[in-house]
Amino acid sequence: QVQLVESGGGFVQAGCSLRLSCAASGRTFSSYAMGWFRQAPGKEREFVAGISWGGGRVYYADSVKGRFTISRDNAKNTVYLQMNSLKPEDTAVYYCAVRIHSGSPEEARSYDYWGQGTQVTVSS
């Protein structure tokens, strides 16, 4: 079992920044790939960013490339999502997830455990 707790969401104006954190516990965090997804009202959950177990490979959705940065600190069992130049269309609940088995880092079905989510609201 893996427990994930997201934090760092909030209400900001367009152009501002936020940093989300996801603290993991339970299993060996450093052995697994991680990802961030988001879900806006009335929309399906979508991939935002992913990172390999060691942090050497990162993946981004086209909509966030150049604005968001995913990173991890295995010593702290934490993965981060730095979000800059936020836009109103970034408004969503953001979820972190653990991918224990092989699979596409961009597909939600590849992930085995999920956090409860943190709300990000960006006003225009």
Image: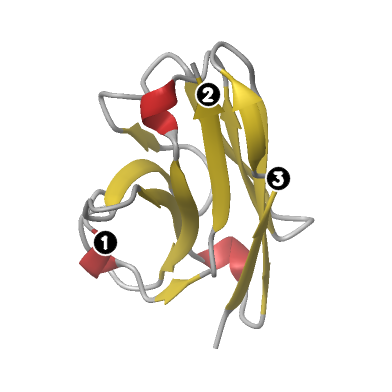
* Residue at the spot of label 2: 123
Residue 90 is drawn in which quadrant?
top left
Place of residue 103 in the rendered image (x, y in percent of width and height, measured from the top left): 22, 62
Q: Label 3 sits on what residue type?
A: Gly
Left/right placement of residue 12 relative to residue 85 reads: right
The residue under the point 22% across, 51% down is 43
Residue 44 is drawn in which quadrant?
bottom left
Left/right placement of residue 89 relative to residue 6 reads: left
* Residue at the spot of label 1: 108
Looking at this view, is 106 or 58 the one in front? 106
Label of residue 53 in the image: none
Looking at this view, is 39 or 114 the one in front? 39
Q: Label 1 sits on what residue type?
A: Ala
Place of residue 25 in the rendered image (x, y in percent of width and height, measured from the top left): 69, 75
Q: Which numbered disc flags the more N-terminal residue, 3 or 2?
A: 3
Q: Quadrant of the N terminus?
A: bottom right
Mark in the foreground, 1 or 2: 2
Q: In 3D space, how far apart are the residues under numbered discs 1 and 2 (Cα atoms)? A: 27 Å
Q: Is residue 50 above or below residue 6?
A: above
Q: In 3D space, how far apart are the residues under numbered discs 3 and 2 (Cα atoms)? A: 17 Å
The residue under the point 38% across, 50% down is 37
Q: Which numbered disc flags the more N-terminal residue, 3 or 1?
A: 3
* Residue at the spot of label 3: 8
Name the secondary structure under disc 2: strand
Place of residue 98 in the rendered image (x, y in percent of width and height, measured from the top left): 46, 66
